[in-house]
Image (tube, grey):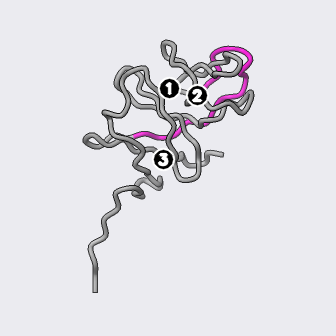
Amino acid sequence: MRFPLELTEVRVTDNLEWHEVAKTSDLSPGEVMYVEVGNDPVALINLDGEFFALHDMCTHEDAPLSDGEVVGDEIECPMHGGAFEIRTGLPANFPVVVPVETFAIKVEGDTVFAAKRDGAR
């Protein structure tokens, strides 16, 4: 016997496990919020209407990027002012020298999904 299976929080497609993390209305452009993708802490960012997700811990010090500030296309760490490029996770300002992990994002309707990328640490 087959039963219909509905998953609203987690979907597996393209070898990625997608997690529902927010509604598009939860974040205005320039805002950041803390979410979780599985067991990973993640900073979800609305950059000019496009969503991006970075691991929430700064690679310089263990400070939450979700407490940081979006400045242009960068997110600034709240501890020492280091910054990362939001689109790529690459270091943008000293003392940050190690990139931060990025997560895959997709938007379906008004729902934002995030997934850990294959091969990500």
Pointer 3 or 1: first along the chain: 1
Residue at the disc numbered 2: 89
Determine the image quadrant of residue 109: top left
Q: Is residue 33 above or below residue 118?
A: above
Tag 3 secondary structure:
strand
Image point (42%, 44%), residue name = 21
Which residue type carries mark 1?
Arg
Which residue type carries mark 3?
Ala
Check if residue 21 falls in the magenta segment.
no
Q: Which residues are magenta?
A: 89-105
Is residue 99 rendered to the left or right of residue 15?
right
Within-10-Å neighbours for mark 1: few <14, some 14–19, many 20+: some
Which residue type carries mark 2?
Gly
Rounded to the nearest angstrom, the CA distance separating label 3 from label 1 is 15 Å
Picture disc at residue 115: 3
Pointer 2 or 3: first along the chain: 2
Report x, y in % for residue 120.
61, 45
Tag 2 secondary structure:
loop
Report x, y in % for residue 73.
49, 17
Report x, y in % for residue 95.
74, 17
Rounded to the nearest angstrom, the CA distance separating label 1 from label 2 is 6 Å
Rounded to the nearest angstrom, the CA distance separating label 2 from label 3 is 15 Å
Residue at the disc numbered 1: 87
Tag 1 secondary structure:
loop
Within-10-Å neighbours for mark 3: few <14, some 14–19, many 20+: many
